Image: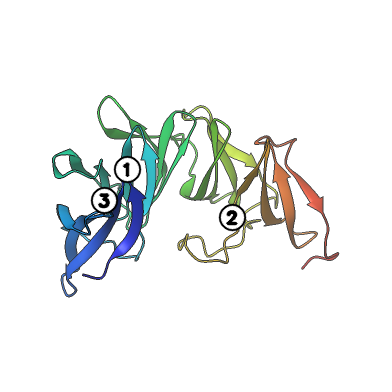
Amino acid sequence: SSPIGCHPFGGKSIFFGVDDPDLYTGGLLALDGATGEVELLGTGEAPTAGALAAARFEHRLYLASESIWRTTGAVSETENLGGLGSSQMEVATAGDALFFGASELYRFDRETSGFAPLTPATVDGHYPVRMTAQGPDLLFFAWQATTGTELWRSDGTPEGTGLVVDLRPGPPSSIYEPLYFPGQPELTRIVPLGSIALFAADDGVHGEELWRTDGTAAGTVMVRDLFPGAY
């Protein structure tokens, strides 16, 4: 069945199994840890990128790749909520919000079970990746034409979503790419540490070094130039 993305939830392991490798179709499955039984929760298109991102939110597991699934581990409480036009998605929680990253950043709407775009219409912020909770806010990397790939922040509202600081001014990116493959190790991670978060960036002067941020431009600084020089 070529299981993809096993995620423990409620005594079960939730994963996608491919039943037709040629058509790349399959279903969302649940393996009961106590009985060893496997139950089909729903059928659909398998993740083409070989990944199935997941996050727990309000007693349910949300899984995202080609489309977004929501489940408690029971067939009667499993739904396919549709997709966001991207074959590779991320999902994360921060504060009391659930976020999805596709070509843009979205917040899950509890009332409609839909997805509200957070990137302001006047800002071309694309492909949010490495989505990480920092207190009640979400930190992530995103690209736009004028700044390249840089650190962004969201409080769950369009007004509170935007670039933290352009560490490498202009179109060049301070965050190493490839950006379109979030699972690849070349892209630095954001690591929360108390009231700050750590990440690696290249400001064009010091090379790639360790940085810290509190989510503000003034509070985003290089920890130390560990290897002096622009490399």
Q: Which label sits in the foreground, 1 or 2?
A: 1
- Residue 73's quadrant in the figure? top left
Label of residue 67 in the image = 3
Q: How many marks?
A: 3
Q: Position of residue 224 (x, y in %)?
A: 83, 53
Does the image show residue 52? Answer: no
Q: Tag 1's secondary structure? A: strand
The residue wearing badge 2 is 189
| Residue located 25% across and 40% down the image | 72
Q: Amino acid at mark 2?
A: Arg
User: Marks 1/2: CA distance?
Assistant: 23 Å
Residue sitting nearer the eye, 146 or 86: 86
Secondary structure beneath dot 3 equals: loop
- Crowding at dot 2, Cα within 10 Å, few <14 / some 14-19 / many 20+, comes out as some
Q: Which residue is mark 1?
A: 61
Q: Are marks 1 and 2 in contact (CB under 8 Å)?
A: no
- Residue 99 placement (x, y as % from top left): 41, 39
Q: State which quarter of the image contains the C terminus.
A: bottom right
